[in-house]
Amino acid sequence: MDFKICTIGELLVEFLASEQHQRFDQTGEFIGPFPSGAPAIFADQVAKLGFPVVFFSCVGKDPFGRMCVNRLKRDGVITDGITFHDKANTGSAFVSYRNSNERDFIFNIPNSACGLLSFNHIIENLLKDCSHLHVMGSSLYSFRAIDAMRKALDIIKQNGGTISFDPNLRKEMFNIQEMEQSFDYIMEYTDIFLPSESEVYYFADNNDESELEIMTKLLQKGIKHIAVKCGAKGANYYGYDENNKIKTMHVDGFKRESVDPTGAGDCFGATFVSLMLAGFSVEKALEYANASGALAVSKKGPMEGTSTLTELDKFISHSKDN
């Protein structure tokens, strides 16, 4: 099946603390810069799988911006939607690790080039043959960015396309009021929903609801497929069977030493969405998505663990042999 994916949002450089428990208020070593940004990692993973993907963002006219764009272009992302901004520098993030899964961030997004992404940066010509839009919650950081997202969403929905949504909640962004308000709007149009296990209860009506009850309500509101990311444990799926009954499934993950968890959920989402659009079964798409997440955590750097379909095949086959 022919499809083309579009995604929008932050493109930035990331610096990683050399030591665990490294504090931001004390001098320490950071390594980088690495190209980063949740939707950028998503786009890179889609392109590595061999599928067409257009990415909209803004970077500064600086070496960081050039590095990010060159990396995406090298991996096959259509970068014509990325604007080199005159008035701001490329965004940045500093990351410190509490353990192999928990991280603290300092983001410079709102005042950076990608923070200035707006309605006018979404070029309609680039969207006309896009059949799917992927939305990242972390990309809804301003009214400008939300307007840009709505423009793309409206165009793709009018053309009969589909929407996937990864809430990608960051505690550092909880005080951005417009982000929370935009979630309700996007959920109305979402076809494929990709929360992590810890994000499920953000969408509950009360504290007593189970994951199944929360997901069932979302399906009844019109979402067609939900994949809950559970890290190394795998993923839980909620959807409908051919008789329109609620269908649930768990697909086990792969054990892999976690070197850097940043980007794993983005790689999982990109693989699951791409393969579902390509006509893979839910179970097969989840297996590949779990493998994609496992390979992502095995490399230091948020985008360094993206993988091709051949690499995923090898990894899955090797895991089964052992």
Image (spheres, rainbow, N blue to C red):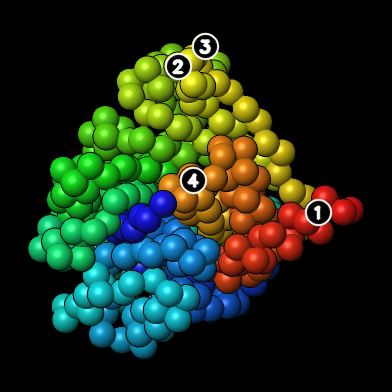
Marks 2 and 4: in contact by CB < 8 Å?
no
Q: Label 3, on which residue?
A: 208
Q: Residue furthest left?
A: 120
Marks 3 and 1: in contact by CB < 8 Å?
no
Q: Label 1, on which residue?
A: 319
Image location (x, y in percent) of residue 158: 16, 43
Give the side of residue 198 with respect to residue 174, left or right.
right
Q: Label 2, on which residue?
A: 244
Mark 3 or mark 2, which has the lower sequence index? 3
Q: What residue type is labelled 2?
A: Asn
Question: Does residue 258 appear in the picture of this structure?
Answer: no
For residue 147, which numbered disc appears in the image?
none
Q: How crowded is mark 2: few (under 14 residues within 10 Å), some or many (20 or more)?
A: few
Q: Residues within 10 Å of mark 4 (few under 14, many from 20)?
A: few
Mark 4 or mark 2, which has the lower sequence index? 2
Give the side of residue 253 with respect to residue 46, left or right.
right
Q: Is 56 placed above or below 206 here?
A: below
Distance from Cα at disc 4 to Cα at disc 2:
19 Å
Residue closest to the eye, 306 or 35? 306
Marks 2 and 3: in contact by CB < 8 Å?
no
Give the side of residue 15 with respect to residue 125, left or right.
right
For residue 279, which numbered disc appears in the image?
4
